[in-house]
Image (cartoon, rainbow, N blue to C red):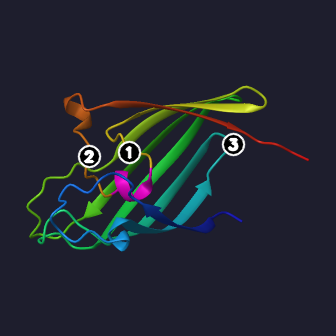
Amino acid sequence: MPISVSYFGSTEIFSAKFENPDRENLFLSRLTYVNQILIARKFSEKLSLEILPTHIHKNLVTTASENNDLFASGIGGRYKITKRLAITAEYFHTFRNSKSTIKYNNPLSFGVDIETGGHVFQLLLSNSSIMREGGFIYGTSNDNFFEGGVHFGFNISRIFSF
């Protein structure tokens, strides 16, 4: 099949202390819900691309002018340089409420995947220090990538077979 379509959903719990202890802070205020449709296509043995329509619902937002719901559209890709080395990129454009008083930076990341036979090492450069979708897509702590706001990330994955 030339295109694959998958659904990704998650519920996230923000566990840090609330910034405003004077407000009634409920457990439900800590929850964020993420819904994504992943539409992907492998164009060749080397090139894969995906489109990621996304909906995020935060039960607690920063200001009254912010919407609890955020829609975003992402694009990502991977290009295999060799059999064991690939470069990756991902960007999300967020569709914000025009009344928003807060300046957010859209998430942008670049990476290198190194396959060693049993493990995949991922080295990432991103403008976000948050790893969960409800955090980095929403963009509350994203920096400006092109003005030095770059963070380094590192993942290791391993597939186990029984």
Q: Which residues are magenta?
A: 132-137
- Residue 143: x and y in percent read 24, 40
Determine whether label 1 and label 2 are within 8 Å by CB: yes
Which residue matches tag 2? 141
- Residue 8: x and y in percent read 55, 66
Question: Mark 1: which secondary structure?
Answer: loop
Which residue matches tag 3? 45
Of the image marks 3 and 2, the number of the one nearer the N terminus:
3
Question: Mark 2: which secondary structure?
Answer: loop
At x 30%, y 53%, the residue is: 17
Q: Amino acid at mark 3?
A: Glu
Q: Quadrant of residue 102?
A: bottom left
Q: Name the disc covering residue 89, or none.
A: none
Which residue matches tag 1? 130
**Mark in front: 3 vs 1:** 1
Q: Is residue 22 above or below residue 110?
A: below
Of the image marks 3 and 1, the number of the one nearer the N terminus:
3
> Badge 3, how many Cα within 10 Å: few under 14, some, many 20+?
few
Q: Amino acid at mark 2?
A: Ser
Drawn side of residue 34 relative to residue 25, left or right: right
- Residue 134: x and y in percent read 39, 59
